[in-house]
Amino acid sequence: MPSDTVPGGRDHSLLVNREIAGVIDHAALSVTEAKLAAGAVATAKIGANQVTAAKLASPLGGDVNLAGNKLLFANHLIRQIDTGKAGVRTLSDATFSSWGCDSLLPYHIDFDYNSGATFSPKAGVGSYVKFRSHDGTSFIDTAFLRGGYFELLKAKLTGPLAANLQDITGIDAGGRSLLAHAARHITGGGDALSGITPAQLSFVPSQVVYDNTLAAAAQYVDITGLDGDAAGSYRLIIKQKEGSGTAGWVELFVNGDNLSGSYHSQMMWVDGATQTNVRYNLAYIGFCAASAGSTSFVDITRDGNGHFRACSHSNYLSGASVQLLIFEMCKTATTTNITSLRVASEDANGFAVGTHILLIKEKAG
């Protein structure tokens, strides 16, 4: 039987579009177009490079099994990399190639490349990768890879943020750091932090009630608008420059009662090995030598019975002459709250220009 015929002597070209059950083995025969009806051929063996065009009359009803082979394109190929992984590679199979698509819907992405994987947009100033998440109503843009930065649009921390001791800069137009920016804006600033409670921070909002460096000499300073019940207690810090040229005492009055006789104070004065203990019917909390300087730290509150009390730790002079003064002062009558304070020198202009007075409250809010 001739090699180009089938049983009965019919030319093989007459088999086109015929249903044949069994095997077609064209070996090295040239087939320019094969049209095989669905389900007509169980096995087809066609010699290498013999099919120039193939058309399926209907979709494949089973799998295409490439086994360990590759699916080749003009410049790329697809093949199995190892168990559970397939890859797009260059036609020479030397390196990985790019996979281009308009929309990718993977269940899981695992970067498993020994020398490190890269996730990047196309080169160019205007190129970017956008990250979005769905809030239950719509997709929200949350971050971009663009311009050399990972740009966060909307984010929240659910764990520690490690800055590796690096400063976070560019918070505002002046390029100030996060700490500098917070110092200017954490209370009442135009761009204050939102959605954060004091308990969630490692610091509390500013508790400074009064902060004044005198631009003109004065005998006393009034601090009003206080609420001692809400504040709990106060810390008063007085950094005095004596301006009268005369040594003098510093007194503290509450709620407009500026009469020294309404108060009593107990003083302990230590000068080297000499200690002096004195009780006064006065509101003393400090002392300053003529034209010198002194510092007093005064804790202020009301006791359980409503008495106004102040405990002052003060020192003045300098070098080998430095001296210690401790005052315990109490108002004779009780008060219902602390609404104002007067810090006073017994001498006119006893507080010189540059004297600094700071009042801090115990509780935030």
Image (spheres, rainbow, N blue to C red):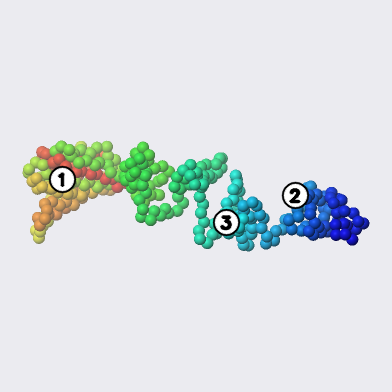
For residue 305, side relative to residue 268 (left or right): right
Q: Please state, as top left, top right, bottom left or bottom right, where the N terminus lies in the image.
A: bottom right
Callout 3 amino acid: Phe
Of the pair 131 and 23, the residue shown nearer to us: 23
Residue 23, percent from left and from top = 83, 59
Of the pair 277 and 239, the residue shown nearer to us: 239
Circle 3 — which element?
loop
Label 1 neighbour load within 10 Å: few <14, some 14-19, many 20+ = many
Which residue is found at the position 27% from the left and 39% from the top? 226
Which residue is found at the position 57% from the left and 56% from the top? 96
Q: CA distance from mark 2 to mark 3?
A: 29 Å
Callout 2 amino acid: Ala
Q: Mark 3 = which residue?
A: 96
Mark drawn on residue 53:
2
Of the pair 20 and 207, the residue shown nearer to us: 20
**Which callout, 2 or 3, points at the residue further toward the start of the chain?**
2
Circle 2 — which element?
loop
Mark drawn on residue 93:
none
Q: CA distance from mark 3 to mark 1?
A: 75 Å
For residue 236, side relative to residue 140 (left or right): left
Which residue is found at the position 9% from the left and 55% from the top? 321
**Which callout, 3 or 1, points at the residue further toward the start of the chain?**
3
For residue 204, side relative to residue 99 (left or right): left
In front: label 1 or label 2: 2
The answer to whether the residue labelled 2 contacts the one labelled 3, judged by CB atoms less than 8 Å apart, is no
Mark drawn on residue 240:
1
